[in-house]
Image (spheres, grey):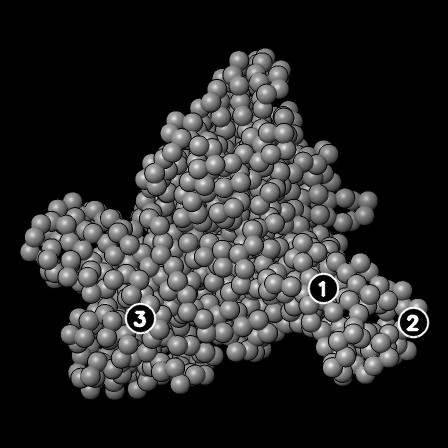
Amino acid sequence: MARVLGTSIKRREDPALITGRGKYTDDLKAEGLAHAVIVRSPYAHARIRGIDTSAAAALPGVLAVLTARDVAAAGIPGVVPVGWLLPDLVTPAHPMIAADTVRHVGDAVAVVVAEDRYLARDAADRVAVDYEPLDAVADVVAALEDGAPSVHEEAPGNVAFDWEIGEREPVDAAFASAAHTVELDLRNNRLIPHAIEPRAVLASYDSSTGEMTIHMTSQNPHVHRLLMTLASLGMPEHKVRIVAPEVGGGFGSKIHHYADEAIVGLCSMKLDRPVKWTATRTETNLTDAHGRDHSTRCALALDADGRITGLRVDTAAAMGAYLSTFAPAVPTYLYGTLMSGQYDIPAIHCHVTGVFTHTTPVDAYRGAGRPEATYVVERLMHLAGEATGLGPVEVRRRNFVSPDAFPYQTQVALAYDSGNYGPAMDRALEMIGYEDLRSQQASRRDNGAKQIGIGFSSYIEACGLAPSAVVGSLGAQAGQWESADVRVHPTASVTVYTGSSSHGQGHETTFSQIVADRLGIDPEAVEVIHGDTDLVQFGMGTYGSRSAAVGGSAIARSVDKIIEKGKKIAAHLLEASAEDLEYEDGSFRVAGSPDRSLGLGDVALQAYLAHNYPDDLEPGLSATSFYDPANFTYPFGTHVCVVEVDTETGSIELLRYAAVDDVGNVINPMIVDGQLHGGLAQGIGQALWENAVYDESGQLVSGSLMDYAVPKIHNLIPFELDRTTTPCPHNPLGVKGVGEAGAIASPAAVVNAVVDALAPFGISHIDMPLTPEKVWRAVNS
Amino acid sequence: MTVSIQLEVNGKPVQAAVEPRRLLVHFLREDLGLTGANIGCETSLCGACTVLVDGNAVKSCTMLAAQADGASVTTIEGLAQNGELHPLQEGFWEKHGLQCGYCTPGMILSANYLLAQNPSPDDEEIREGLKGNICRCTGYHNIVEAVKYAAERMS
């Protein structure tokens, strides 16, 4: 049978989705369904003097209007917890519904439930909230200034945490003796994830059983169930079923536990009816956790040969008004630990201050910390290429971790498992036609307004989150393994129950390939079930590019256990020793006796009949695994962006984008390329267009798709992709993960390209997004 | 208060009494159960709700159901004929033109309108023709390929 790993088989998910039959949360109906609308603060910071719900409640068809008082009266915990603790982290309470103070525009103050969606909206407009507006601070730097408005009394100076990694003294020494130093003050712009499906929930409580079923937009239903029951609703975990039906993208925003889903759960409990809430785009933009929002001062020291001797990073990272689910981990353990990039750096120090602001909370968004780290390192490498005269290619090559240095221990905790960075750079240069491009660039330098720029980004990421003991020692309040239950049926078809829940990645296709390849059967004989806490054993979910590396490895483990058991059954039936049995292409064979074999179907049937069966074996042919990896995985690559900058107008045209990525072994190349394409679009979007802008009063100015520029099809170009393959040495599939690579690498590549184009103007940096106005101002200043 | 409307949806006559303010997308999704048209922004910017109204690609989140009185509406559910996928549906499947699928019905119907206007568009014309539809997953690379695939199949 042909290998199915490494094959671009078409996605089994697609027929439902291209015909309109896929069911997303808002598509679902229920008998007696009521609709919720959440009333939100229009102020970034205000005291609630009173709420008058009478006019809303009086509208015919309105079923309930709830406020913080009702949460308190329900006797439930009623809070939204943070799931990652740092030493000395300040953890102010985050109530499901604000009681006396609102802390960002969009903070929930009441909820209206009515028979009809339109009616609920009408009633929400009649909830009268008496606010006393207070001073607000939205900017991460301004929030740290003396006298800045305070977000939480418990957090003096708005500091949520103060964290560092690496050692300061060796870095100071490196700078003191450096031949070259480069430094940079940069902003990493705040982003709004913009999954095209808004968050939605349909909660159905049944008082006769005390059970609640919640269909919701979730990347991790079990984690949502745990947080929802433990911290918000106070229900027994086993009485709540969470189902993620089709989920229309997430990019991190559907990992987190939000107030809104818990509020809708409470409404359903109060009314004993199914209640649905679907966010509007404006609500999505005000409440989905945002990404990035750093202010960073960083510097690199190099010796006379252009070898890096030290890296210093100091970052203020916005947390927003409350600590979202994994927020504290993002600018710390997913950021500071990545500062070595692809380079052998002997001294690194990274200091991060977590900062409360009167804004939407910030949490993991595609890449989560790693794009910010890559941006710091790769912007500095660009400057280092100029300062040393080595140029962007040679300065990187000279500092790459040598291929024989793996496993490579960085100065910032991580130990890279495998890597070979030179070939990805070589291939990227070849694809882009580097020497020709440099000649074209040179010929334009004194010739006209339109300048060409070439930008590089040689990135590393740590993904496949990750060994539980490690993340636990770093403050995670969760394990980071993944689960798989693989069941071979009596007819030798297979059902996989995976804890990794898809929201567009094609898990069903990819995971069926893993099973089919390992068992030597047709992928069509494998069904993949995910996203339902009643059907599937506890699972950690989909984020951090972990599904293939951790979830896929769990499946592979289970298949291996099944094969081992199958060998014992086959050995019994063939009157051979289990040690002498081999499994290949769907058959158990006695080594050296090719005529003595049994198909998987024969063995599976016997496993369930158990008529003629080994005394020491239990019937059945299924296996569950909870796979906890030995390390993170470390995908890497080199991306090259080519732009043309019109120095008269400041406009930027993308000319080429070539990406060479090493994500280890590839299960489905088509899906892997698709993941890269999507990540690239988001990273290029960050570099050129996307920006969550707050005004001084804390209003989100870019709260709609009119003002927040998500890349459209005519903004982008075809992407040129290739791969090198350095398998992950510590998981059974040799895979690393690919979901975030594009978003991690590309912002630096784009900005480096634009800055390269503008080199004749002495421009060394422009903050993202590189709007024509900013470019024009830089050129004309 | 309601207004009564008569229209054709996916080739079938439909008669209904709707609130004057009822949006076409809610009428299709909630009253007719045609949930293929998705709502992504309610402001006609994302295009997830795109349907064909008398052959024109229309964002059904900013059209009233009452305005569709007398019109012929095609949703994604009406695109496949006699159990055969439309070439655009095939193209999106074949070329991995979708990931989460939420924008896909709208994207396919916009592409359908594009190909009706211009049966053999080049890459730039495809990108120009679909700029009213946002996809957050694919980076659009394979959507262009999917539309080209369909154009070839249909020519």
> Nearer the N terminus, badge 2 or badge 1?
1
Q: Which residue is mark 1?
A: A486
Q: For numbered disc 3, what is the local secondary structure? A: helix
Residue A272, image x and y in percent? 73, 40
Kindly identify which chain the residue marked by label 1 belongs to.
A
> Nearer the N terminus, badge 2 or badge 3?
3
Query: What's the CA distance linking mark 2 and mark 3?
Result: 60 Å
Q: Residue at x 54, y 60 (%)?
A: A7
Residue A144, image x and y in percent? 33, 63
Q: Residue at x 50, y 43 (%)?
A: B92
Quarter placement of the N terminus of chain B: top right
Kind of residue sitting beneath label 1? Val
Tally of numbered discs:
3
Work out whether residue A304 or residue A256 is closer to the camera in this orientation and state it.
A304
Q: Which residue is mark 3?
A: A426
> Nearer the N terminus, badge 1 or badge 3?
3
Looking at the image, residue A498 sits to the left or right of residue B60; the answer is: right
Q: For numbered disc 1, what is the local secondary structure? A: strand
Picture quarter containing residue A333? bottom left
Kindly identify which chain the residue marked by label 3 belongs to.
A
Kind of residue sitting beneath label 3? Asp
Query: What's the CA distance linking mark 2 and mark 1?
Result: 23 Å
Q: Residue placed farthest to the left in the image?
A: A446
Q: Which residue is mark 2?
A: A612
Q: Residue at x 75, y 76 (%)?
A: A594
Kind of residue sitting beneath label 2? Asn
Quarter placement of the C terminus of chain B: top left
User: Does residue A736 appear anywhere in the picture?
Assistant: yes
